[in-house]
Amino acid sequence: MRFYSGYILVNLLLICSTVSLAQERIVKAGMKPITYMRGTGRTITVLKELQVWCKGAQPDSVLWAVRYASRGDTSCEDLAATLKVLTKREGRNLKLAILRHYNPFLSKDVVLSYVSDSLKKWNRSNYPDDAVPPVVLELPFCINSRITLRPSEIYFFPFNTGIGYPDTCLNEMPLAASIGRSGVVELGSTELYFNKPTYNSPDEKISIMVKQNGKVQEDKIVDQLVYKNKYKLTDTLVIGKELFRIDSIGGDWENVYLRRLKSGTLQAKMPEAYMRQLAPYFKNAEEYLMLDFWGTWCKPCIAAMPELRELHSKVRSRVPFVSVCFDNPENYTRAKEIFAENKLEWPQIFSSMKDREHTIVGALSVTVFPTYMLVKKNGDIFFSSGPTGFRELNEIVLKH
C-alpha cells in the first residue's frame, strides 16, 4: 500500500455497466512526452540492494538493482532486465554511478553528484525539480526473441521517499526510481497523463490520470458519473460531464484517438452477493443506506467518527449506517472497543485483510480509507468518496 498525506490512495474500482452509449466521431489528439512531474501518476519504486558496504551505522557504498522491464519474451535467456546502480559517499557529496563495469551493455558511464546535506532535507514533495533529471540509457529488451537496445528514461531519487528499510545503513543512503514511459494529451483545460510502468509492459498496464483546471480527479461517484484517480486503457473516462473511450494510441506514442460517447451514464452497482448481505440493513431505509469503510489502523477514519456520529443522529430514522471494518481478524475486538469509545450506535461488519479478494472491500476495490458510499435499494451506488468528500456526503444526506 502507498501512503500520501496520511491517507491510503489506490485506485477505486467499481462494478460498472454502460447504458445507451451512442458513439460520435473519433477525436485525434497529439501526445507529448513528459519528464518526471509531481501529480502525473508516475510510480516511484523503492529499489532492492544487492550489496552494502557499511562502516558502523554509516554507509560507504550501496549497489542497487533496478528492474527496468518485465521479462516479456522468455526466449532471451541471457537477459536479466536489471540495471545495476552504485551510490557512494565521497566527502560531503553522494555520487550515483551507472557504470559499464556492472552493466557491460552501456556505451559509457553515467555519474550524478548530489550534496549530502541537501538530500537529508528533501522528500518526495519538497525536492527541487532540477534535482531529479531524466537519465536516458540504451537498455536491452527482449523483442521478437532477440535482445535489442532501446532508449529508456529513468529518474532517480537518492533521498527519503516515505518508505523505510529495516537496515540502518540503507536508511542513511536510500534510493528509489521512476521507470517507464509517460505522455500528456491536452484537451483545452484538461490534461490526460498516460503512464506505462515499463517500456515493454502490455497495454493493459497503462494508466491514465485526468487533470481538469489544474486539479487531478479523485475516486468518487457523483450523479452516477464514475470518476477515477487512475483509469485503465479500457475504462470509460469522465471529462467534464462527457464520456470518452480510448480507441487507440498511434505511432510511437505520438497520437491518441479518443471516441466521444454521445450519451449515456455509468451506473456503479453493488454486486448481487453483497446486496443480499446488506439486505437486512435496508429495512428502515427510505431510499438508500450509507457504508463507511474503515480499519483500526486508519487514524483519519477514527478521527472522523465524531462527525460521522453527529451526521447519523440527524438522519438515523431514514438513512441506516453500516460500517465495514477492513482489518486483520485479531483486531476485530479492538474495532468493537473503538466503536464503543466513540459511542457509535450502528452495526458494523468485518472484512478480513487476509482474504481481501473474497470480501466486499475486494469486490469494490475500496482502497481509500475512510470511504463513504451511498447505496440505493436497487443496488445503484450513486455516491462514493474518500475523506475529502465528507462535506459533500453531508450535503447529499441532509438534503434528501
Image (tube, rainbow, N blue to C red):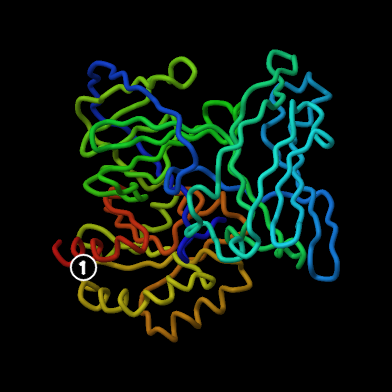
Residue at the location (41% across, 64% down)?
Answer: 370
Comparing 272 with 149, the one in front is: 149
Whether residue 112 sits left or right of residue 304 in the image: it is: right
Whether residue 236 sits left or right of residue 149 in the image: it is: left
Comparing 128 with 25, the one in front is: 128
Residue 378 in the image: above or below residue 58: above
Pinpoint residue 107: horizontal percent, then vertical percent.
74, 25
Residue at the location (59% across, 42% down)?
Answer: 155
Residue type indicated by callout 1: Arg
Classify residue 356 by image quadrant. Answer: bottom right
Classify residue 281 by image quadrant. Answer: bottom left
Pinpoint residue 92: horizontal percent, then vertical percent.
70, 62
Pinpoint residue 46: horizontal percent, then vertical percent.
65, 51
Quarter of the picture containing the N terminus is bottom right
Q: What secondary structure is marked by label 1?
A: loop
Pinpoint residue 50: horizontal percent, then vertical percent.
82, 48
Residue 303 in the image: above or below residue 191: below
Residue at the location (45% across, 66% down)?
Answer: 294
Whether residue 280 sits left or right of residue 63 in the image: it is: left
Quarter of the picture containing the C terminus is bottom left
Comparing 236 with 271, the one in front is: 236
Going by the picture, which residue comes out furthest to the front? 91
Alpha-carbon neighbours of circle 1 within 10 Å: few (<14), some, or many (≥20)? some
Q: Residue at label 1?
A: 318
